Amino acid sequence: MTEPDREDAAGPVVAQPPIISNHGLVATVYILYLVGFITGITVLIGLVIAYLQRRTKDQVAQSHFQFQISTFWIGLLYSVVGLLTIHFGIGALILIWWIVWTVVRCVKGLLLLNKGEPVPNPKSWLFGET
């Protein structure tokens, strides 16, 4: 039997479409990252979603999930370096750069997603360009 033709005690099991599309999940992660500046914890929720969905067959969503994962890890590096160097004055500049960089990446990702386009270079350290 094929997967959609399976039967259980209640009758045939029919595959249901997902409640939230891949593109909806991508947008959700970008929003969770932005809300993370206020709450902190939502960034981790977004990261978990991105990791769990990164192997999707949808190439557009896949590039965005990779971009989001890269955004988290590179952003974590920026924030740690910024916090470690805050007493030397340069740390404040690094932290401001991290905030601006994160917002630009999230907004750029949302705009690309809105057009149905993948991130050209999802592992980029800047803004996803090639």
Image (spheres, rainbow, N blue to C red):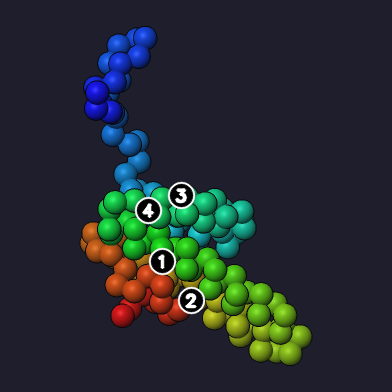
SS under mark 4:
loop
Q: To which residue does mark 2 refer? A: 101
Name the residue: 61% across, 53% down.
41
Q: Nearer the viewer, mark 2 or mark 1?
A: 1
Marks 3/4: CA–CA distance: 8 Å
- Relative height, residue 31 to residue 125 (above, below): above
Direction from residue 78 to residue 15 in the image, left or right = left
Q: Quadrant of residue 2?
A: top left
User: Comparing marks 4 and 1, which lies closer to the viewer?
Assistant: 4
Tell me the CA gap for discs 4 and 1: 13 Å
Real-space CA distance between mark 2 and mark 1, rounded to the nearest whole angstrom = 13 Å
Mark 1 surroundings: few (<14), some (14-19) or many (≥20) residues within 10 A:
many
Front residue of 122/7: it is 7
Residue for badge 1 = 67
Front residue of 80/37: it is 80
Q: Which residue is mark 4?
A: 55
Q: Is the residue under label 1 in contact with that under label 4 (CB below 8 Å)?
A: no
Q: Which amino acid does the dot numbered 1 rest on? A: Phe
Q: Amino acid at mark 4?
A: Arg
Which one is closest to the eye, mark 3 or mark 1?
A: 3
- Residue 8 in sight from this viewpoint: yes
- Residue 52: image tag: 3
Comparing marks 3 and 2, which lies closer to the viewer?
A: 3
Tell me if mark 4 has few (under 14), some (14-19) or many (20+) residues whose alpha carbon lies within 10 angstroms of its own: some
Question: Callout 3: helix, strand or loop?
Answer: helix
Task: Tell me which label, 3 or 1, sits earlier in the chain.
Answer: 3
Q: Amino acid at mark 2?
A: Trp
